[in-house]
Amino acid sequence: MLNSILITGGCGFIGTSLIPELLKINPNLNIRILDNFSTGTPNDLARVTQYTLKAANNCTTNLGVELVNGDIRDENMLLLCSKNVDCIIHLAANTGVQPSVANPRIDMEANIIGTFNALEAARINHVDKFIFASSGAPAGEVNPPIHEELAPHPVSPYGASKLAGEGYCSAYYKTFGINTICLRFGNVYGPSSKHKSSIVAKFIRQALSSEVCFIYGDGTQTRDFIYIDDLVQAILCSIDKDIGGETFQIAMGKEQTINEISTLIAKLLEYHDVKMITQCNSPKSGDVKRNYSDVSKAKTILGWEANTNIEIGINNTIDYFMKINAQ
């Protein structure tokens, strides 16, 4: 059983969904969080757990949750924060295709240098397990379903940076024996996603504010969605498995068009007397036409599969946004 975990980017959507589940399994687990608060905030973390704010040079191995304000691009920060931990869950990143198109250098610095710093810290501090939050974006424009053995052809800087992270994870397993696991997340949605700009969270947020929901392209482009609770279970399965050097597609394994998803969101919003207005716009550069995953490897090796029906998941997400709007 793990005694101590470092979670980079732990104040974000995935981190604040993962931490309560980790503490349910082991209330005595020491969780150290490194976050620069660019997306998630200390208030987001306080919503799910009590924590102690610490300086990087004052981290302890006491029981509880410690929060350090710092950046993964700072190698010394990661060296300090990864001392005396058994596992690093590397969630911190410049997330999404469009931010990477807008500023590819920032994307590279966060996703390549930041991941390298985290792996180096794991090597120097003898951390045995490293779980890397990747994406389907490294595969790029290929004929789906995407599986782990497809030759990657990234379209966006984001896909390229995540591919580099996967490459370093493979090298640090082969060369240094760190048990790295790369999880290629599908399009994640669910409660607590107020800071996300992907389609489910964005369309619900815009509809509740009576804004137009823009579909970039003709809406026939496809994505593979995954509910946050299912994604958290994939991370927990990865922690438990004594394996390394592996990459897994983590998604529903179902191809759905943007038009289908927007129609479903609109239908579910109607039950709350909310009208969603959509409008097509020009496609955005860096986006792929089709994207869905073959998740058979995750089922076979991790013993994991997604279970949440997308209609239930989206309805739960609508309920979440309506509650925070009413506050």
Image (cartoon, rainbow, N blue to C red):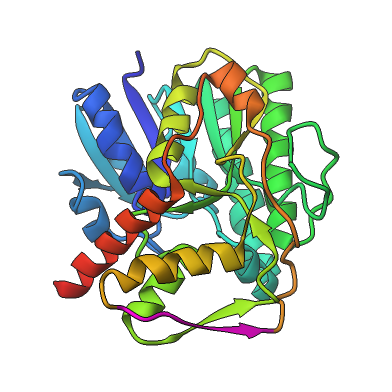
User: Residue 308: image x %, image y %?
Assistant: 41, 40
In the image, residue 67 sits, relative to residue 124, either above or below, namely below
User: Residue 132: image x %, image y %?
Assistant: 56, 37
User: Residue 81: image x %, image y %?
Assistant: 40, 38
In the image, residue 34 sits, relative to residue 127, either above or below, namely below
In the image, residue 149 sits, relative to residue 189, either above or below, namely above
The answer to which image quadrant residue 29 occupies is top left
Does the magenta segment cover residue 279? yes
User: Residue 259: image x %, image y %?
Assistant: 59, 68
250 with respect to 67 (left or right): right
Q: Where does the magenta region start and end?
A: 274-281
The answer to which image quadrant residue 117 occupies is top right
Answer yes or no: is residue 43 visible.
Answer: yes
| Residue at x 74%, y 67% (from the top left corner) | 286
Answer yes or no: is residue 178 visible.
Answer: no
| Residue at x 77%, y 45% (from the top left corner) | 144
Q: Main secondary structure of the magenta part?
A: strand
290 with respect to 199 (left or right): right
| Residue at x 68%, y 35% (from the top left corner) | 294
Does the magenta segment cover residue 213? no
